[in-house]
Image (cartoon, rainbow, N blue to C red):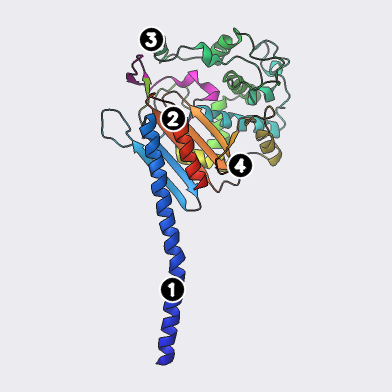
């Protein structure tokens, strides 16, 4: 009987020792998630109608939402919301371009003139690489378009733009730098041209190639390139633009996305974007030497390569990804290089203030703990 009691005591002690770290881990996880939710709430308090986030880390996957899906309602933001991801589209377009390079169908040093004769002045000096890393010197066409609260902005809401129209607006302005390759200057014009080059190389639109090469293989079922369709399919928060100097907001959720094209039209979710960047950084979409090209600075001291950006958090962790501004939706998707930590944030701004600082604080919390 004594031996049995001793065995029971030993077993009970062992279970207690085993349970203690488990309980501590669970408490740590719960505290971490509570703090992440607080930081997300801070983003809304700083000037967002609604916001959502997906974090993937050592604790697993956590999804949070804050604020409203639609003004003048009590509807919460759907946790699996779709949203316009803006310039995160550039990383998709760049990945397709680099896949064509890997296949030997395109070279980074090919001049634009070789694929799009007469499209831009000095096209013989501007290369595919220059378009990818924003050193082409081409003026950003978005700077030529009216923006809210200008009344003219609203007249373009349903307009279908062609890349040729938008590029023509850009090249009517002098280059921002010369020679090509010497200066980093973010330009959406370059990605319109890359979309056209993809079509010239493959005989299919850049949207079809992104769908065929990335979206379907990765089973990103909630990601799409809408073309001329103004709708966002599936659950989504509403997006707004200011229409008066006083900041009165107009629901601008539906709009013709051709104005963003190959540099910004994609619709996605936090889950799908985390899946995409994990596949990219794990070399499932590109061979290692081309991923290295993506992560090489365009110009010394800059933090942008070939369609991929990076930043260092306050704790010194380097994260890779891209941010996106589709006017009514803003998003950030970043990952550590080993993809063990990933964060995607999306929000609908109310334009009361710049939300970058609040989002940076959230990212730091998610990556640094």
| Distance between the alpha carbons at the discs numbered 4 and 3 | 43 Å
Q: Position of residue 174 (x, y in %)?
A: 63, 8
Q: Which residue is mark 2?
A: 355
Do the residues under discs 4 and 3 have CB atoms within 8 angstroms?
A: no
Which of the marked residues, 1 or 4, is nearer the chain's N terminus? Answer: 1
Crowding at mark 1 (Cα within 10 Å: few <14, some 14-19, many 20+): few
Q: Mark 2 falls on what kind of element? A: loop
Crowding at mark 2 (Cα within 10 Å: few <14, some 14-19, many 20+): many
In magenta stretch: residue 239: no
- Residue under the image location 42 percent in, 82 percent down: 9
| Distance between the alpha carbons at the discs numbered 3 and 2 | 25 Å
Q: Mark 1 falls on what kind of element? A: helix
Side of 162 relative to 235 (left or right)? right
Task: Mark 3 vs mark 2: give the one in front.
Answer: 2
Q: Mark 3 falls on what kind of element? A: helix
Q: Which residue is mark 4?
A: 281
Residue 69 appears in which quarter of the rendering? Answer: top left
Q: Position of residue 16 (x, y in %)?
A: 42, 72
Task: Mark 1 vs mark 4: give the one in front.
Answer: 1
Residue 41 appears in which quarter of the rendering? Answer: top left
Do the residues under discs 3 and 1 have CB atoms within 8 angstroms?
A: no
Q: Position of residue 358 (x, y in %)?
A: 44, 34
Which of the marked residues, 3 or 2, is nearer the chain's N terminus? Answer: 3
Which of the marked residues, 2 or 1, is nearer the chain's N terminus? Answer: 1
Q: Which residue is mark 1?
A: 15
Residue located farthest toward the bottom when viewing the structure as drawn: 1
Above or below residue 364? Residue 185 is: above
Residue 47 appears in which quarter of the rendering? Answer: top left
Above or below residue 91? Residue 365 is: below
Q: Quadrant of the N terminus?
A: bottom left
Question: Magenta part of the protein: which range?
Answer: 242-267
Q: How many marks?
A: 4
């Amino acid at each position: 009987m004594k031996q049995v009691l001793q065995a029971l005591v030993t077993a009970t002690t062992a279970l207690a020792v085993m349970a203690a770290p488990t309980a501590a881990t669970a408490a740590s996880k719960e505290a971490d998630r509570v703090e992440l939710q607080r930081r997300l709430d801070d983003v809304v308090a700083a000037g967002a109608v609604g916001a959502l986030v997906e974090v993937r880390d050592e604790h697993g996957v956590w999804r949070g939402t804050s604020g409203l899906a639609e003004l003048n309602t009590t509807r919460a933001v759907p946790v699996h919301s779709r949203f316009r991801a803006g310039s995160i589209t550039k990383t998709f377009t760049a990945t397709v371009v680099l896949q064509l390079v890997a296949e030997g169908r395109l070279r980074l040093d090919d001049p634009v003139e070789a694929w799009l004769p007469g499209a831009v002045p000095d096209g013989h000096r501007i290369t595919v690489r220059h378009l990818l890393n924003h050193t082409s010197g081409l003026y950003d066409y978005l700077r030529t378009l009216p923006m809210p609260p200008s009344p003219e902005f609203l007249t373009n809401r349903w307009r279908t733009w062609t890349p040729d129209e938008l590029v023509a607006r850009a090249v009517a302005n002098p280059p921002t730098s010369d020679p090509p390759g010497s200066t980093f200057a973010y330009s959406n014009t370059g990605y319109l041209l890359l979309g056209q080059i993809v079509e010239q190389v493959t005989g299919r639109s850049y949207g079809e190639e992104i769908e065929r090469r990335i979206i379907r293989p990765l089973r990103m079922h909630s990601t799409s390139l809408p073309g001329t369709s103004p709708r966002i399919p599936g659950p989504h928060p509403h997006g707004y633009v200011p229409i008066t100097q006083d900041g009165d907001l107009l629901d601008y959720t539906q709009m013709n996305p051709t104005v963003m094209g190959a540099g910004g039209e994609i619709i996605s979710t936090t889950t799908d974007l985390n899946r995409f960047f994990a596949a990219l950084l794990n070399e499932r979409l590109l061979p290692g030497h081309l991923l290295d090209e993506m992560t090489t600075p365009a110009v010394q001291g800059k933090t942008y390569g070939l369609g991929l950006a990076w930043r260092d958090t306050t704790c010194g962790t380097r994260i890779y990804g891209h941010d996106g501004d589709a006017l009514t939706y803003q998003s950030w998707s970043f990952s550590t290089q080993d993809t063990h930590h990933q964060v995607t944030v999306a929000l609908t701004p109310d334009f009361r203030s710049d939300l970058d600082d609040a989002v940076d604080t959230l990212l730091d919390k998610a990556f640094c703990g």
